[in-house]
Every structure is written in structure tokens, then in C-alpha cells.
Image (cartoon, rainbow, N blue to C red):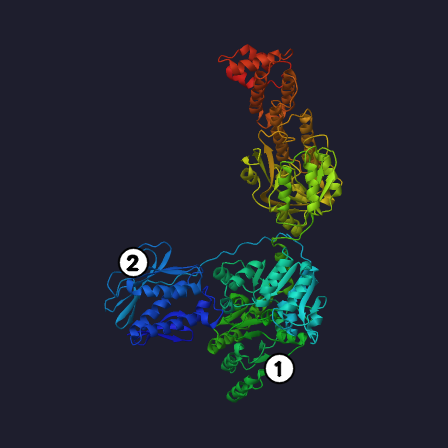
Amino acid sequence: MGRVTYSDFKYWYENNGELQEIFSYKDTLKNYSRLPLHTVDKSIDAIVKRSFEFFSNSFSGNQGLIEAFFMIILLVIKKAMETPDAMKVVCVGGDIQWLSAYIDGILKEMHPDSECIFSNTAYDRIDGCSLKVVSLLSGGSLPEKDGSTVVAVKEHEEALIDCYTTYDFGMVDVITDYREGAVPEYKLPERSSKAKRNIRTVAAMTPHNRAFNNSELVKDIGLVPYLLYKEEGCKVYLVGLDKNVDYPAKEFVSGTEMVELESYDLDSKKKWIEEMGHSIDCLMLFGTYDDNIHISKIYREINPYGVIYLALDANSYWINNIPRFEKKYDEFYENCDVISTATETLQKFIAVKWKMDIDVVRCGYYPVGIDTVTVPDYDSKKNEIVTVGRIGSKEKRNDILLEAFAKIAGEFPDWTLKLVGPVAEDFNEYIDDFFDRNPELKERVIFTGEVTDKKRLHEEFLASKIFALTSDSEGFPNVIPEAKSAGLALALTNIDVAKEAAGYGLSGEVVPTGDALSLAEVLRKLCSDQDSLKEKCKRSFEDYQDKYDYKKIAHELYSVLNSVDKKVCTNGPLISVIMPVKNNEKFFPKAVQSILDQDYSNWELIIVEGMSTDKTGVMADDYSKADDRISVIHADEWIYESLNIGISKAKGEYITFLNSDDLLMPDALITAANYLKCFGTDMFLFAVNSTECDENQNILTQDADKVIEFSKEPFVLEGDAECRGAWERIMRAGLLNNQLNVYKKSVIKDVRFRNDIFGADYFFNLQVLPKVRSFAYYPKCLYRFNSYVNVSGMNASVGKYYTYSHGMYNDFYLKSVELFATYGVLDENALSMFRQIRIANFTGELVSYTYDSCKLSLEEKLKEMFAYTNDLRDMLIMEGRFEDIEELALKISYKIISESSEKVEKLVNIKKGVETLFIDNDPDIEAIHRLTFDYYNPAHIGVSRLKKLV
């Protein structure tokens, strides 16, 4: 009869003296378990022991059943540990229905979305099931294999079942087809290095309910912010020094502003953040502590567009102690823009365990107290092994190092061991015993005591060849990068950082924790081969230069922080919205309301009211009285001069425009403010949803999806070269077809809208383009441009004929070509785009001859249409558009001819030719020939039809 045994965080199945490991509690810490081991009661070990007690009480006197159901729980937990995702378990069999609720509770401790459900029969196929717990105690058979793992309890029998492992517990067996699963893969996303902001002020705050201690000023919590000051020019606050404490390390971080708080409780920290948070571009937090969680929330409220950087400051054991799925922790991590850990190993561990993107920001070495780091001279080094730290502290396991050295000391009589650091009082008894056992080593094992002088400490490293660290558990020991900066080979126990720091064997060796024999063997290997040792020392220094130089680390972190996208911004720049309006009492209130409903509040609305004859003017004044952000200017001007007036009166850093019958989407201004506060660009672009509406602004048609297809990805462009290189792309996406963008006032204050053409917005943007040094674009329709179907008095420029439109569009074409040529970005692609734009505009010109507003005579309409087509003939041929524009001109000609009773005198051939094309079943070839080659048809419209007929 077998049983389950427990030893050193390992669980074993023991039978007839043979041990089979079920799982190791310590190993699972590094096997991507998502169990939040934040309290003793919720550790894996506690869950398992609690389960044993539960079954002991449930099956009192029946040890076999106790052991069997306990084994089932172990296998359930082992299966759940294989994945960072939720798991579904099914309990099958009426006599274990009670067990489903118990397993469900365990699973939810491991992952809140996991579950265990009950099923009467094993033959039910349950979607998503990864494990079935089956009872065969009352009969039945094993379920057919369907991809899920099976754990079953049944009465004992000697025969074994193929493909199943059997655990014998006397009267009952537990059988399973469980096989060890692979560690899940997680591909870390590539982070853009493109700068999206300019961080200039940084604050690092003590994470504890105490002030900084002296040593912390020269660790990552003090040195990283200091280097952002020294190397990147940031203003840096170190928040949480004690005014009653002497800090010798202050000299090493001088230049930062060291903030002394009255006390170090949460209220004092909150007070400082509330006073200063709005001016802090980046808040640096260290560790998942309650104070940091509270401070991050306050900072985000005060400065929603700031960056929160969190250094987790944890190893795999501590990570498992964090209750990742509790709401406050989940919100905290979501609130942080950049979260880092010190090693690639832990980065991947967290990425899989938490499914969270993690950056690597290694602990490095910066030469405080010495001039600079120079290439170590191996030949000047002594045959010396050194360790540095709190000698004798429990987790450092210096006893392992001493015992290992004692084992090899006789083989290497010219080698010494040096232990640098303060010695724990309770370790002296062990030291005395060690020297009693090894009296010959008293002169070769040196305890230096604490060394506070940084220069002398670095000299201790430079003098040695091997650095040893024998800790059972560590985060990222700061002494490792300092040892590498002095060119020491490493002998490390297998803490999280060990293999990576040792260059995976290139610059050191890694041994199991607590194993003096293995450490002795590694020291023997290093000491016996000087050539190999020299190479490892060389590689160690090169690794320092590549990965552990704090200046390089801080610079890379600064780049990451500057590349962070902005979170929601609520107190960004003042944005002036200019709205011209006249005689629009029906839709004008809706346009104003779309401003009042904005998620963003830092705006002003300037209404330029055109001396309306309806209630519009009165309504505008009422809005101004009700909200001091709204002002009204009464001026009887056309739309574009009204915009010029609004620009001259605007107080905002940025300006945008809203037509009085259009709408801004609720997130329009907050989206713009986010980008503008983040990147400070001269112009913010967004997509416009062009709609057709009925008399109540109900949408009949819209092109939102089509518009976004032109440019699906957001972008930020900076500098003349980058901006001008993107002019074609921006124009091709239709982002400059109107004035519905957000402009920096300083860029457009001297640019005026023409007031003599309806397309002045396009011309305005052509003038603005050379002045814009930076663009931002967000691919969302933030503006609704309304045109109306059968609504009188609306569509001031839509569905209208303008006598000057042909000349205006020609001018736009020529000005566009001239602009691109002037700034050296004109190529065939750009020319083709301008031709296509011109042709698209020309189709609108042709259609405009059908509008009621076109008061030209029939003969004047035909004459212009045929003459203007000839203006563009070469362009149409180059773009392969002649035939379809020719066909459009013929159709529109027939429409206006058929709808008119006017006679023509000079264009008789054109009129007769068009009529025979569309009326006669057997067209008059001669009439079409005369149409095609008539004096008033220089483009030879109709030639394509003629060729087909002939």
C-alpha cells in the first residue's frame, strides 16, 4: 500500500521504499504557476495541507481513501500549474458530487476564472474541459479519450491499465493518464522606440513607511533617477529623505532635488503628489506596495497624461506572493505605463504567469565614488575569491561558501577567500566553529568588516578573480554588476538572475542552492584553469559594458518612457472651437450641444454669428450667458471671413472649427488633447464621417468605414523631412480636404481663409502645410460632416453651382504641384494623385450643371462642359479616365438637353449628336460624327462611341 509523503516542499508517492516525485513546491514557483502566494493561507503548500486535513476529517479511520483523494487533489493542482490560463475540471460520478465543490474552490484560488463542474456521466462531452476526475467506486468505465486528462479513483486490483499510471492505496487505486506538459510559450511584443513625448521632470518616491536609507540612494531607486538628471537633463525629485538623518551618499546623487517629508506615512506622500504631481512627467515607483498603489491612483487623477514607471523589484518567489487577480493589484498594474523586472528570465516568467508585457531594466553599476570604470588588468589580480554583502545573514548562506572553500583549499594553497561586509552577530559562533575545524585557513579566510568607501570597495573587486554569491533567494543583487565591472568570473547559486548574469557559462558558473559540494566543484574548475578563468573575467567585463553599465541602462529606459502612448488627458491645452453660424436655429443647438457634451472640458467656443434674421443670434447670446467658456461675435460675414475673425479672437493654444450644422463626437477633443499634450504637434488630423441626413439629422448614408480604410494606423511625424515626406500620404487619405483639423494657433495665426471661393479650406491647408513641423493622426471619425437630402436652406456649398469652380479647381491643382515642387517632394506618384484629385473635382463640376442653382442657358452649359473637358483632356488620358469622363459628360448633356425647352444656335451639332446617342435605337452615325468633330467640342467627346459604332 502506497502513501503520499512530504519533504522540503516536495510531494512524493512512496510505495515499497521507492519514491516517485509528484511535484516540487519550489520548482512550481518557476514553472509559471499563477497561484497568488501572497499569504501563508493561500500558498500552494497551505492549500495542499488544508486538503489533507479535510480528507482526514472526511474519511476518519480509512487511511486509503484519505491518501487517494489527497492524491487526486495533488494531480489537479499539478495540472492547473501547467498553464497561466483558467482551467475547467469536470467531476464525474454521483458518489463524488461533493468533491466538485471542493475542487472548484481550490481552482478559483489558483485562477479566478477556473471552475469545476459536476456531470453524472463520463460520456458527456464538455467544451473546454481539460481534466476529468472520475469515480469508478460504484462501477462504470473510463471515459473515451477526448484530449482531456483523466484522474480516476477505483477499487484496487492487481492488473494495470495500459497508458495509465497507477497509485495503490490499499483498498483503492488512483489511476491517471496525466503526462507532464510543456511550459507555455509567450512571445514578448516588440516595443516601438519612436519618441512620442518629452519627459523633463521625474519623481522617485520612497515606497515604504520610512525614509530612504543611505544605501538606497546609490541603488536603482536612487541611481536611475539621478542618471536621468545627469545624462538626460531631467529635473529629478528624490521624495522621502529624512531631515534628521545624515546621508553620506548624497554627494553621489547631487543635482537632484532631495525632498524631505515631515513623516513617511501615506498622507505625507499624498500631500506632496497633490501639490506637485501636475508638473511631474514621470512618477517612478519601486515595488508592489500599498503606498505605491495609492500614490499611483492620486497621480493619475492629477496628471492623467503622465507616465507611471514601476520597477517590480522582485524575484519569482515574490512574484508568486502578489495577488495578481485582486482588483486593487489589477488596477495598479493597468495604471502603470511601463513595468520592469531586472532579468530576461523573470520577464518571460511574468509574461506567461500574468500575461502582461514587461520590460527588462537590469540593475547595473555606476562608478559612484571613483573616477570611472576602466578595463581591468587580469595580470594584476590576485588568486582571490571575494563575496560582498551582509555576512552571515540567513538568506546569504555564507556558510556554504566557507564549507566549499575548505574542501578545495588544500588543492590551491595560493588562493584566499575574502568576505567583505558587516558580520551578523549570530554568525560569529559559526565562524569560530569553522576555524576550529579548519585552523589552517585562519590566514586565508579574511573578514574585512564593512567597507563604506566606494573606491576601496571597487579596489577589492579589482584585486580578485572570482566573485561568489551563495544566496538561497535574492532579487537582483547589486554586487553582481559591480563585480562584472571589475572583471570577475562569477560563481553563483541558482537565483533568478544567476544564469543570465553568468552569461550562460561564458562569464561564470551556476550551482544549486544550498549545495557546498557542487560549489566546491565549480571553484575547483575555475581555480585550476587560469586560461579559462581569464577568458571568463574578460567576458564578464564585456557583459558589463553591454548590459550592466547604468548609464546605458538609464538611457534605454528613458527611451522607453518617452515612447509610451498617453493615457486619458483631462486637463491638457486650451482648445478654441470656432463656429460660424447664420439663420440655423434648427441645427445650431445640436452643434453647440456636441461641444458641451465633450469628455474634455478645457475648451472655449467662439460663435461668429452672421446677424441672423431668425432666433439664431438670440440663442447664441443665451449660450454665452449660460457658460463662460462660450463667447459670441456678431458680424455679418460669409463663412470663411467668419473663421478669420474667430482665429483672431481665439485664446487657445490650439484651434479647430465646427460648422453649425455638423457634430463633434464626444471623444473628439479629449483624443486631440491627448495627442497634443503628448507630442505637442503643430497639427492633429482625424477622419471625418461624411453623411447624408434627413430633416432631423437622421443618417441616411455615411462613409465612416470607407474613410478609415484610407489610413488605418495612427502616426506621429516630426521634423521637416518626415512631415514633407508624408504630404502625399496625408493628402491621399483625404485629411486635408477641409478645415476640420486641430491646428496650433502659432502656426495658422498669419494664414487667412480666402473669402471669395467655397473651397477656401483646401487652399488654406496648402498654405499651412509648409509651416507644419509635426503631425499627429488618429484613425477614428471624430467629426460628423452633415449634408442634407431635401432640406431647404442647408448645404451652403453642397449641391450648388459656382461660376468660378472650374478656375478654382485648376488653381488648386497648380498650387498643389507648385507647393510639392518647391519643397522637393514632387514625383510621379504625387503628380498622379493631383491629377486624380482634379479629375474627381471635375466630375463634381459636370454634375453641378444639373443643379437648379445653375442659371446658365442650355447653350452656355454645353459650351462650358465641352470646353472644360478639353482643358483636362491630356490629364484624363494620362490617368486612363478619358472614356468614363466622356461618358459622364454625354449623360449629363443629355439630361440637361432633355429637361430644357431652350433652343441652341451654335451648338446644334452637339445637341443632335447627344440626342441620337440616347434616343435612337439605330443612332445616326453622321450626327455623331458631327458631334465628335464640332468646333465647340475640342476634346472630341463622343469619339469612343463613334469608334464602337463604326
| Quadrant assignment, res 706 | top right
Q: Earlier in the sequence, mark 1 or mark 2?
A: 2
| Residue 228 appears anywhere in the view | no
Residue 583 vs 516, above or below: the answer is: above
The structure residue drawn at horizontal position 71% and vertical position 66%, both measured from the top left corner, is 256
Dot 1, crowdedness within 10 Å: few (<14), some or many (≥20)?
few
**Residue 700 relative to residue 448: left or right:** left
Rendering coords of residue 282 (x, y %)? 65, 60
The residue lying toward the viewer, choosing from 59 and 212, is: 59
Dot in front, 1 or 2: 2
Task: Quadrant for residue 558, please give it.
Answer: bottom right
How far is mark 1 from mark 2, CA to CA?
69 Å
* Residue denoted by label 2: 122
441 left or right of 109? right
1 and 2 marks in contact (CB < 8 Å): no
Foreground residue, 80 or 31? Answer: 80
| Amino acid at circle 1 | Thr
| Rendered residue at 48%/71% (across/down) | 39
Instruction: Give above or below for 638 relative to 68.
Output: above
Q: Which residue is mark 1?
A: 448
**Quarter-of-image position of residue 116:** bottom left
Q: Position of residue 480 (x, y in %)?
A: 58, 70
Q: Where residue 394 is drawn, which disc sits there?
A: none
Q: Which residue lies at the image location 58% right of the left edge and 44% below the top edge?
A: 779
Q: Position of residue 532 (x, y in %)?
A: 54, 70
Please identify the quadrant where the N terminus is shown: bottom left
Q: Residues within 10 Å of mark 2 (few under 14, many from 20)?
A: many
Amino acid type for the residue under numbered disc 2: Ala
Q: Determine the secondary structure under disc 2.
A: loop
Image-based side of 919 in relation to 275, left or right: left
